[in-house]
Image (spheres, rainbow, N blue to C red):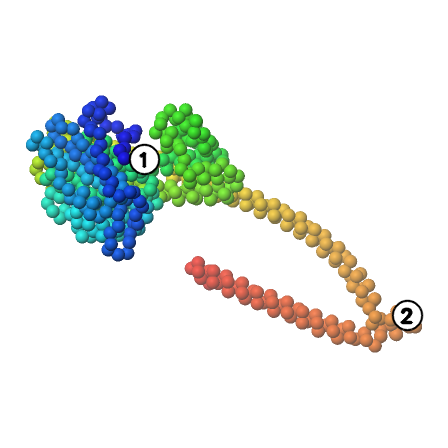
Amino acid sequence: MDLTPERDLNPSARTEQQVHQIFHQPQLVPSPLPPRRASLAIPNDKSVPTNIHKVECWVYDGNRLPSTSYAHGTFTKDEITGWLKSPSPAAYNGVRPAAGLRLLCREQETSIKWPFDKATFGAIQEALGLPATDSYLNMPKSGACGKYLGTPGHPIFIFHRSNNNGAISAVLKYDSFTNITSGYALLGPRISLEALCTQIRSQFAQFSHPLLVPTVLIELTATDLMRELYHVNRLLTASEYKTRSGDWEIQDSLANAGPTLSPSPADLLDSWHDEAAAEMQREPPYWAKMSREMAECQDNHQLARILGWMACRFAFMNAAVQCSLSMVEFTRNEMDALETYVVPATRRRLRAKGAAGDVMNSVCLRHRVEMLESNLRHMAIFGAIEPRMQAQQTMLFNLINIGMARDSKELAEASKRDSSAMKIIAMLTTLFLPGTFIAAFFAMPILDWNALSMNDVMTNHFWLYWAISIPLTIVVMAVVGAYGRVQAIRNHEAAANARKEAGLKEV
């Protein structure tokens, strides 16, 4: 189906009437098969239909209007490669296209799997004239940017970035003789394929440059990263509110979201007065869950767990910002280097600098890339999130330690009270023990107090008491002493092992 361009956060310099004057209604490429999901990879060489988005744009010199087309459906290997190999549109009044773009777009949910089956992927590589290598796709958790210059005037640009924010890959072959770019782009689920296709179609007439696609990809990534950083900053501010720390002099909504965690949808536009900012404020499901946990959190230990999750999330987002910066730097450098290996006719277009024949608009695109680079560098320090998060972690650990110290103090006081009670019991026991022993001893049957004389009080069994109690006392004392000795040896060995592991000398 046809897509109407949505609100562009980076509008071009042309007015809306000018844009309508130079654009035809997009022409659809019919989908030969009903849409259905396709496997990302299969173990054999058989080809299966693949669900993809196709974008095609053509720009002409002179007064002829540019044309664009878009299709989304399930296509076979032969249909994909036939489309990539198809010739450019016929000349119009003797004027051939000044620039063109054929781009395959596909969602790649899992970065460690191939985006196409083996047969289709090999056919796409052959159709694009790519080297018989897929090494850049074998780096699923690192990423890389580079180019091949096997054929003079036909550079192949490779952009690959993969992390938890979703894989982003673009492989673009640029023919400087015809000024036509062809290739494919792979996006994770966080970046909308429809948004990419819409922006490419709406901007290619003004920026008919081979590096427009990575520029738009990075811009979409930056928008998504800014949304993530906003939510990290918002929950971090809520944590500062709960710990009664933070700079509450700041009144700006983006820098200080305040204790309100989930504004009602009706308040979004009223509070922001900006549709783009209101869209940023809307929460994805996982952020809504964390907002609820933060709102219900009343315990420092739970708050520390949430803050730890936020720190990990921010670390991944910061890594994505750094990866995007490396992609921007590579794009900017290639814009400068492009003039050194393209054909003279294209070199003149690159140097047109706003003249009538400047369909590539390389100067404005470079300024756009420089602004994007500056935006990413500012995102890296947005809201001072990293030092504030470290301060919050320190604050929470201090609060937890203070709470533990308070509990320890209460336990010590309770132990002191118990110790006082035990002392009283020991004193009473000591006071009554002699009398109790005498009473118990005199009450034993080995003494007969009804005897006629004191000499007859001790019976013939009086010796049994001493014969049993004295050896038994010796045995008990020996067992207690042996147990104490064994425990002392074990404690000494444990202390020696601890000193050895710590690298300390034996005392």
Provide residue 465's location: percent of width, then percent of height. Answer: 77, 72
Q: Between residues 240 and 475, which one lies in front from this camera angle?
A: 240
Does residue 132 sit above or below 246 in this rendering?
A: below
Q: Give me the C-alpha separation between circle 2 and circle 1.
A: 106 Å
Within-10-Å neighbours for mark 2: few <14, some 14–19, many 20+: few
Position of the N terminus, as image quadrant, is: top left
Q: Residue at x 24, y 52 (%)?
A: 47
* In this picture, residue 223 sits left or right of residue 502: left
Q: Which residue is mark 2?
A: 450
Foreground mark, 2 or 1, reads 1
Give x and y (percent) for residue 8.
28, 30
Tell me residue 84's x, y (percent): 18, 43
Residue 279 visible to an observer of this rendering: yes
- For the residue labelled by badge 2, is the local secondary structure a helix, a strand or a loop? loop
Kindly identify the amino acid type of the residue bearing the numbered disc 1. Thr
Q: Position of residue 156 (x, y in %)?
A: 17, 45
Residue at the extreme right: 452
Instruction: Determine the residue positioned at 38% across, 41% down.
Output: 314
Is residue 15 at least partly visible in the picture? no
Dot 1 alpha-carbon crowd within 10 angstroms: few under 14, some 14 to 19, many 20 or more: some
Q: Is residue 338 above or below residue 358?
A: below
Which of 104/359 is in front?
Answer: 104
Amino acid type at image mark 2: Asn
Q: What residue is pinned by disc 1?
A: 223
